[in-house]
């Protein structure tokens, strides 16, 4: 092919950011997801939703996570275990219909700087927020890990909203089942029951608590699972009628091998399946720590694994790892990809997809 000099000149003068090669620098470009790269929202700012979770509601995905901004510092009270922190600013939400382009919906739960005793005071800890929609009460319910600066108070906080984009009203915190509660997630089953899954007994044992019908309290029915296995960053999801589990070990912000498990009932018995990660960096969860797994609407066997690649000395620059999760004969796997597209997953059978014969 011949290139005319005029075209060549304009190509050479093109700003660097427009060159195709530069597109690859963003976590999402030209329809691909690039795990570990900076992921920009629709206004061009880096997405700020760490330790997050996903809610799919009326055709829209809502990504909620910790807003991490300001200086990262190491308090005396957590120095022994490298407990770097940023002060609490709140929980941010993004919305998207295509899982690639994310609109910033702002801080849907804000820190409360004026009251030093408030759970959401900047000097506290507010981590791993997860949101579910309660069809009975029509409320969006957020649970999160609330703590004191030294991580000794170990509580579970709850907030509700009438809309997915908030504002969320903070209702308070508890020590569920009379125990401490740190890393946590939510799981909503097909029958409308919701569960909170969290690290307890000083991170030794994972607890699964059934929430009340309004999802606002712990019902008192709970199980101790993975006893003394010391897990954090728990994730529960359902596929083919079985319950699947992911977690990390306990090494603070530093990565470690992921754990996985399966059960026929949420109450167990749970069978551990080992580290589901495959490919370069698999032994350290690709430098990340699990936070959520969710099914992609309209596609079969399509689950996305969400993790945080923490940058402990500059927490706001922590990155997101989104990878496809695939079920195998023995369990499931998460294989490293430099870049991947949602059409990695087959479309749901019976559905016509552009560019393919129906
Ligand atoms: C991690 C935990 C994070 C955060 C961090 C603090 O293990 O999963 O959510 O609490 O420790 O160092």
Image (spheres, rainbow, N blue to C red):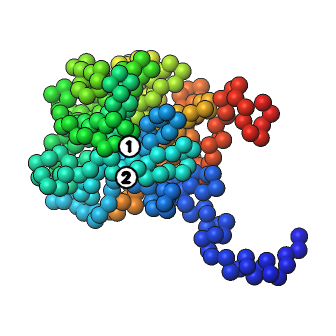
Confirm whether residue 254 shows in the render.
no
Number of labels in the image equals 2
**Given contact means CB atoms under 8 Å apart, are the residues at marks 1 and 2 in contact?**
yes
Considering the numbered disc 1 on the image, is that residue within a helix, a strand or a loop? loop
Quadrant position of the N terminus in the picture = bottom right
Residue shown at 41% from the left, 30% from the top = 236
**Measured from the top left, where is residue 257 in percent x and y?**
43, 43
Horizontally, is 98 left or right of 206 in the view? Answer: right
Name the one closer to the observer, 103 or 233. Answer: 103
Question: Is the residue marked by circle 1 packed among few (<14), some (14-19), or many (20+) residues within 10 Å?
Answer: many
Residue 106 disc label: 2
Mark 2: few/some/many CA within 10 Å (<14, 14-19, 20+): some
Residue plotted at (20% across, 36% down):
171
Residue 313, quarter of the rendered image: bottom left
Asked whether residue 21 is in view, the answer is yes
- As displayed, is residue 87 above or below residue 204? below
Q: Which mark is residue 280?
A: none
Q: Is residue 194 left or right of residue 273?
A: left
Placement of the C terminus among the 4 image quadrants: top right
Question: Residue 301 versus residue 355: which sits nearer the camera?
Answer: 355
Q: Which residue is mark 1?
A: 165
**Residue closer to the observer: 296 or 233:** 296
Q: Which of the two labelled residues, at mark 1 and mark 2, occupies the earlier sequence position?
A: 2
Reply above or below: 358 against 316. above
């Amino acid at each position: 092919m011949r290139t005319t000099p005029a075209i060549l000149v304009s190509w050479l003068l093109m700003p660097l950011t427009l060159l195709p090669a530069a597109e690859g620098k963003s976590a999402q470009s030209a329809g691909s997801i690039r795990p570990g790269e900076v992921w920009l929202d629709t206004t061009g700012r880096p997405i700020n939703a760490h330790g997050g979770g996903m809610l799919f509601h009326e055709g829209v995905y809502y990504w909620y996570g910790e807003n991490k901004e300001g200086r990262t510092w190491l308090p005396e009270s957590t120095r022994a275990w490298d407990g770097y922190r940023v002060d609490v600013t709140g929980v941010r939400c993004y919305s998207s219909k295509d899982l690639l382009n994310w609109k910033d919906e702002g801080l849907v739960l804000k820190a409360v700087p004026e009251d030093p005793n408030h759970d959401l005071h900047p000097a506290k800890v507010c981590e791993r927020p997860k949101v579910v929609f309660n069809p009975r009460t029509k409320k969006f319910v957020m649970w999160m890990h609330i703590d004191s600066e030294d991580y000794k108070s170990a509580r579970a906080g709850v907030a509700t909203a009438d809309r997915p984009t908030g504002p969320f009203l903070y209702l308070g915190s508890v020590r569920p089942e009379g125990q401490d509660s740190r890393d946590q997630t939510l799981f909503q089953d097909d029958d409308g029951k919701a569960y909170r899954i969290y690290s307890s007994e000083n991170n030794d044992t994972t607890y699964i608590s059934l929430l009340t019908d309004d999802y606002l309290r712990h019902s008192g029915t709970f199980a101790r699972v993975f006893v003394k296995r010391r897990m954090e960053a728990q994730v529960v999801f359902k596929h083919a009628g079985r319950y699947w589990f992911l977690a990390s070990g306990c090494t603070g912000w530093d990565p470690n091998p992921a754990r996985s498990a399966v059960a026929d009932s949420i109450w167990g018995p749970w069978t551990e399946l080992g580290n589901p990660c495959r490919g370069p960096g698999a032994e350290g969860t690709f430098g990340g720590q699990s936070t959520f797994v969710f099914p992609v609407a309209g596609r079969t066997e399509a689950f996305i694994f969400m993790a945080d690649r923490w940058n402990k000395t500059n927490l706001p620059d922590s990155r997101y790892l989104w990878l496809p999760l695939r079920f195998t004969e023995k369990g499931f796997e998460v294989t490293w990809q430099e870049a991947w597209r949602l059409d990695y997953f087959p479309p749901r059978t019976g559905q016509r997809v552009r560019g393919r014969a129906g």
